């Protein structure tokens, strides 16, 4: 039988058994919530079970390696974040390569971070914050949730892009980070829009910029940082990948089914509750995003001399 007929037959028969979506983080987190919403919808539309398998540990390394080493038949997938493009620079000896051992399927969605300051900080916008930091080098402090996390690297990117100096304070969790920011022990923070929005609304924090290239629909009155610092952009993205050498026909089938799932109202509502804008793009476009992020975070981590804890 010609090879192309074999490929078509395989794609028609796929999936032949339940599909595992490995989430490299603990249950009930943002990535897990999205994966379960997608799994439920895919199970309904494809007629085969899609099961979420949590493999937390190593800042996502354990789960990603499990997928990188899995059979390339489309029955083991990875639902992860752009931590995939950060880990290689913090852990250069990890036993897999995102570019060699994984193949992109689609971007599920992305969420910008919000830059917020304590009300006592005399800066009403990003331009004033930059001027304040330059007038007091090393005196302002920014909280974040740990080395190499999106909030940490967003802060480092701001320092490097604006050429300013401030102290970055590491916390072990979001609760402690927000408590000290609201309490005024630190001046500012980067955090998720859903997490910071209630604090902004109550006046406990002041929002001065979003990290996406354009303004966030949920906070249209808050400027994008890029309006002051052209080219500044950092978002948390969520995407689905498969082991390298997974048949192209399977990749495209999954891409199409996930894209359709993202258009369903129940999935869109779940994403919106997490402050995530749904995507659904082709594998090549997702691959280009991965490549761009790898270059961006490699430069930021090297320039900031960031080391893992």
Image: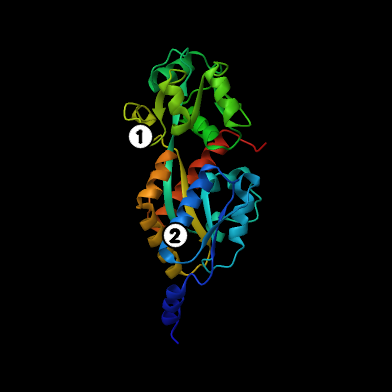
Query: Which residue is the site of mark 2?
Result: 42
Name the residue: 44% across, 77% down. 7
- Left or right of 70? Residue 187 is left
The residue lying at 42 percent from left, 47 percent from top is: 109
Measured Cα–Cα span from mark 2 to mark 1: 28 Å
**How packed is label 1: few (under 14 Cα within 10 Å), some, or many (20 or more)?**
many
Image coordinates for residue 24, horizontal then vertical, percent: 59, 50
Q: Is residue 63 something one can see in this rendering?
A: yes
Does residue 273 appear left or right of residue 171 in this picture? left
Q: Residue at x 34, y 29 (%)?
A: 227
Q: Position of residue 296 (x, y in %)?
A: 48, 42
- x and y percentages locating residue 258 in the rendered image: 41, 57
- What residue is pinned by disc 1? 216
The residue drawn where x is 58% and y is 20% is 180
Q: Earlier in the sequence, mark 2 or mark 1?
A: 2
Circle 2 SS class: helix
Left or right: 86, with 202 as reference point: right
In the foreground, 225 or 301: 225
Image quarter hosting the N terminus? bottom left
């Amino acid at each position: 039988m010609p090879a192309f007929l074999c490929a078509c037959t395989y794609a028609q028969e796929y999936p032949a058994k339940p599909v595992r979506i490995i989430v490299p983080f603990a249950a009930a987190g943002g990535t897990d919530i999205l994966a379960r919403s997608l799994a439920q919808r895919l199970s309904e539309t494809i007629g085969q079970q899609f099961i979420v398998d949590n493999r937390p540990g190593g800042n996502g390394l354990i789960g990603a390696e499990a997928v990188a080493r899995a059979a390339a038949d489309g029955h083991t997938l990875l639902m992860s974040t752009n931590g995939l493009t950060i880990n290689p620079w913090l852990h250069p000896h990890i036993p897999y390569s995102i570019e060699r051992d994984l193949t992109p399927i689609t971007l599920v969605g992305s969420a910008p971070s919000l830059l917020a300051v304590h009300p006592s900080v005399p800066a009403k916008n990003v331009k004033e914050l930059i001027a304040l930091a330059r007038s007091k080098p090393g005196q302002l402090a920014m909280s974040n949730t740990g080395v190499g996390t999106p909030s940490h690297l967003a802060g480092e990117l701001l320092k490097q892009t604006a050429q300013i100096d401030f102290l970055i304070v590491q916390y072990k969790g979001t609760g402690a980070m927000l408590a000290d920011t609201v309490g005024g022990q630190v001046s500012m923070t980067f955090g998720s829009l859903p997490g910071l929005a209630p604090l902004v609304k109550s006046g406990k924090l002041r929002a001065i910029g979003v990290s996406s290239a354009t303004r966030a629909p949920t906070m249209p009155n808050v400027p994008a940082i890029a309006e002051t610092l052209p080219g500044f952009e950092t978002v948390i993205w969520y995407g689905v990948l498969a082991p390298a050498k997974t048949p192209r026909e399977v990749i495209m089938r999954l891409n199409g089914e996930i894209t359709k799932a993202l258009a369903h109202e129940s999935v869109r509502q779940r994403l919106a509750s997490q402050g995530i804008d749904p995507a659904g793009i082709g594998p090549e476009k997702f691959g280009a995003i991965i490549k761009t992020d790898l270059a961006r975070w490699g430069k930021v981590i090297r320039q900031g001399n960031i080391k893992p804890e």
